[in-house]
Image (cartoon, rainbow, N blue to C red):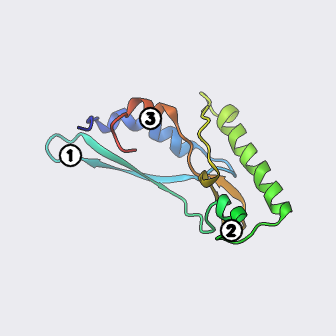
Amino acid sequence: MRKKHSPTMFTQHIEMISRLRHNHLVSCIGHCFECCPDDSTVGIVYFVFESLPNGTLRSSICGGGVRLNWAQRITAGIGVAKGIQFLHTGIMPGVFSNHLKITDVLLDNNFHVKICTYNLPLLARQNAGLMV
C-alpha cells in the first residue's frame, strides 16, 4: 500500500528541482500531482523535463546511436564532471549521490551532455512507497 501525502509536503522539493539550472543538467519544466479523489492526497508526482533527442551517452559510445569521436567523448566527460560539480557545490544543500550511470547522461541537439537523473536522496528518503 502506498503512503499518501498532501501536495504541500512536496512544495520545497519541487521548487528545488525547478530551480536547478545548469548547462549540463536536464531542466525540469513542469510538474503535476495525481491526487486521490477520496481525500485529495497525492498518489503520484509527475515531473516534465526538457526533451533531448540524441539518446544516451552510452548509445553514442557503444553503438546504436550516432558515434562520437574522441574529442566529443572528452568534451562529454568534462561536461558530466561540471554537472556533478554543480550538484555537489552549486546548490545548498549539495546533492551527493553515487548512483550516476552512463545511461543517465543524455545528448542534446548539439551533442552536449546533460545529466537527467539527479537521484535526489531527499525525495527518495521521504517518499518511500510513493512513485516520484
Q: Inspect this view and state whether residue 62 appears.
A: yes
Cα separation, mark 3 vs mark 2, equals 32 Å
Q: Position of residue 63 (x, y in %)?
A: 68, 68
Q: Is residue 40 above or below residue 55?
A: above
Marks 1 and 3, the one that precedes in the sequence: 1
Q: Point out the residue furthest to the front here.
A: 62
Q: Position of residue 18 (x, y in %)?
A: 52, 45
Q: Is residue 112 above or below residue 12?
A: below
Mark 3 burial class by Cα count in 10 Å: few <14, some 14-19, many 20+: few
Badge number at residue 10? none
Q: Nearer the viewer, mark 1 or mark 3?
A: 3
Badge number at residue 36? 1
Mark 2 burial class by Cα count in 10 Å: few <14, some 14-19, many 20+: few
Horizontal side of residue 34 vs 112, given as left or right: left
Q: Which residue is mark 3?
A: 124
Mark 3 secondary-structure assignment: helix
Q: Position of residue 104 (x, y in %)?
A: 59, 51
Residue at image point 72% right, 48% down: 80
Horizontal side of residue 94 vs 68, given as left or right: left
Q: Is residue 129 above or below residue 103?
A: above
Mark 1 secondary-structure assignment: loop
- Disc 1 marks a residue whose amino acid type is Cys
- Disc 3 marks a residue whose amino acid type is Ala
Badge number at residue 63? 2
Cα separation, mark 2 vs mark 1, equals 43 Å
